[in-house]
Every structure is written in structure tokens, then in C-alpha cells.
Image: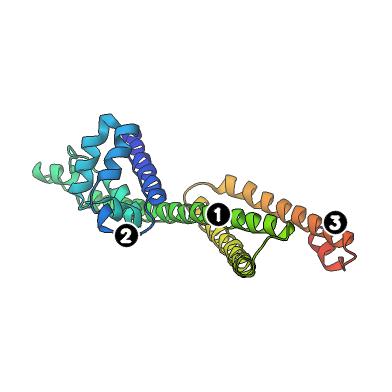
């Protein structure tokens, strides 16, 4: 059952990724399940009807909603966790006149724990989606820079194209900064998740790896600065 839930959740995530790549902006054209049906026909035909029914049961009615709803991952987790044959153990014991008070308390604590874990998990996934999207945007910007640079090298670039190149260069720099910020955010949430939910040993190794990585980057800068005759004393402190 657990494996089935994970498979369903993964299918829904892949569906969201597919729709996000296909739909640039909201429009009436996507207020239906046309693209979802096409995707499921190819990737999960045996579960197509079931998934469409689950989406509609949870008040999700269109490709656009899946692509643009910021909380869609939370809804997907809820859908994956549903079970039509779920039995309420506490209610069952109450019907047998068994005192289930302590069980209710433990059940509430466990529910809160799971909900908090699912929230953190979804936040991590959302950051990864944002990273993937911004990396795609960065690649497109760099491709355009390459095209303009070729024209510039051949003295064929027009004044308006040169202005566009300057604008793209500026946007590319902002994209690098945004990706860096998202990566730092991802690492923060990753370390918090590991520390809270049992990844302590892996977290220790990860942090040690980051320290080695920082020294490696510092060494690259030292070599670059040496090549250009720049001051490196402040960088040498980072590499030791």
C-alpha cells in the first residue's frame, strides 16, 4: 500500500512538471484536462481514470490549476494518502466500549508529526521545482547571449541587438543570484529535514563535504587571482 501511494505521488509530481513545461500562462485553453489526459494516456494509461477521478474528488479541475497552483503539492500529498477503505481504530475501540483516550492522544501527536514532516517535504520539492525552472530560464538566456556574441565577433550586430545583449547579460546575472539564493534555501531546509527526521549521520557527512567544497572553491579563486596578478591573502585564509 505504501509503495502504491508513493507511485501515485510520483506520477502526480511528474504530471505537474510536464504541465508546467507545456503551459506558459493561464488561459481558457487550459481550463480542462486535455494535456493531463494526453500525458496519462502515454505514461499511466492503466491509472488514467482513477487519477482523473481523484483529482476531481479533490476539487482539481484543470491543467492550469495543476500548473500554477502554489499549493498543488500539498493537495497531491493528500490525494496520495487517501484510502477508501481506511478504518478509524479509535472509533472502532469506542464502539467496543474500550477506553481509547490514550490512543487518541498518541494518534493526534503522530498526525501532527506526519503533517509537519509532509509540509517540510513539500517545501523542499517546491524549491527544487523553482530551481529546475530557473535553470531552464538561465540556459535560454545564455543561448541568446551566445547568439549575439557570435554576431558581435563578426561585426554584424546591430545597435538594438547590442542593447538587447546588455539587457540579457544583466538578467543572466540576476538569474545566477536567484539560483544561488534558492540553492542556499534548499540546503537550509535539507539540513533541517535531515536533523529532525533521522538523517543525522548523513547530515554530519554532508556538512563536512561542504567544508571541503568551500576550500576547493577558494583554491580555484586563488589560482584565478594569481593568473591576473591580484591580491590573494584573504583567500588563502579560506583555503586552510
User: Which mark, residue 26?
Assistant: 2
Q: Earlier in the sequence, mark 2 or mark 3?
A: 2
Residue occupying the far top of the picture: 46
Disc 2 is placed on an element classified as: loop
Q: Tell me the crowding category of disc 2: few under 14, some 14 to 19, or many 20 or more residues within 10 angstroms, Cα based.
A: few
Question: Is residue 44 shown left or right of residue 236?
Answer: left
Mark 3 or mark 1, which is nearer to you?
Answer: 1
* Label 2–label 3 contact, CB within 8 A: no
* Precedes in sequence: disc 1 or disc 2: 2
Q: Is residue 170 above or below residue 48?
A: below
Which residue is at 31% across, 48% downward? 76
Q: Which residue is mark 3?
A: 223
Q: Which mark is residue 209?
A: none
Q: Nearer the viewer, residue 178 or 158?
A: 158
Image quadrant in which you'd find residue 6: top left
Q: Quadrant of the N terminus?
A: top left
The one of 33 and 119 positioned closer to us in this rendering: 33
Farthest right residue in view: 229
The residue tagged with tag 1: helix, strand or loop?
Answer: helix
Where residue 58 sits in the image (x, y, percent)? 21, 50
Q: Is residue 22 above or below residue 176?
A: above
Q: Is residue 33 visible?
A: yes
From what the image shows, is residue 198 above or below residue 134? above
| Label 1 crowd (10 A; few <14 / some 14-19 / many >=20) | few
Residue 219 position in % (x across, y down):
81, 55
Counting residues from the start of the chain, the first of labels 3 and 1 encountered is 1
Q: Which residue is mark 1?
A: 140
Amino acid at each position: 500500500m505504501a509503495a502504491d501511494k508513493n507511485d501515485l505521488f510520483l506520477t502526480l509530481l511528474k504530471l505537474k512538471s510536464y504541465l508546467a513545461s507545456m503551459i506558459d500562462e493561464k488561459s481558457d485553453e487550459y481550463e480542462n484536462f486535455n494535456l493531463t489526459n494526453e500525458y496519462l494516456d502515454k505514461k499511466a494509461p492503466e491509472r488514467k481514470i482513477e487519477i482523473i477521478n481523484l483529482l476531481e474528488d479533490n476539487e482539481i479541475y484543470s491543467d492550469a490549476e495543476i500548473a500554477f497552483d502554489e499549493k498543488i503539492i500539498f493537495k497531491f500529498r493528500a490525494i496520495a494518502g487517501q484510502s477508501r477503505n481506511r478504518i478509524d481504530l479509535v472509533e472502532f475501540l469506542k464502539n467496543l466500549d474500550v477506553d481509547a483516550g490514550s490512543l487518541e492522544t498518541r494518534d493526534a501527536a503522530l498526525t501532527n508529526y506526519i503533517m509537519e514532516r509532509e509540509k517540510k517535504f513539500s517545501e523542499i520539492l517546491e524549491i527544487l521545482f523553482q530551481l529546475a525552472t530557473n535553470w531552464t530560464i538561465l540556459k535560454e538566456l545564455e543561448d541568446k547571449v551566445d547568439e549575439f556574441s557570435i554576431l558581435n565577433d563578426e561585426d554584424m550586430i546591430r545597435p538594438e541587438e547590442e542593447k538587447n545583449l546588455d539587457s540579457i547579460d544583466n538578467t543572466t546575472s540576476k538569474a545566477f543570484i536567484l539560483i544561488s539564493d534558492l540553492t542556499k534555501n534548499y540546503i537550509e531546509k535539507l539540513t533541517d529535514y535531515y536533523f529532525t527526521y533521522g538523517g543525522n549521520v548523513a547530515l554530519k557527512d554532508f556538512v563536512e563535504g561542504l567544508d571541503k567544497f568551500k576550500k576547493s572553491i577558494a583554491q580555484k579563486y586563488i589560482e584565478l587571482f594569481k593568473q591576473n596578478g591580484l591580491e590573494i591573502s584573504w583567500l588563502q585564509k579560506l583555503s586552510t
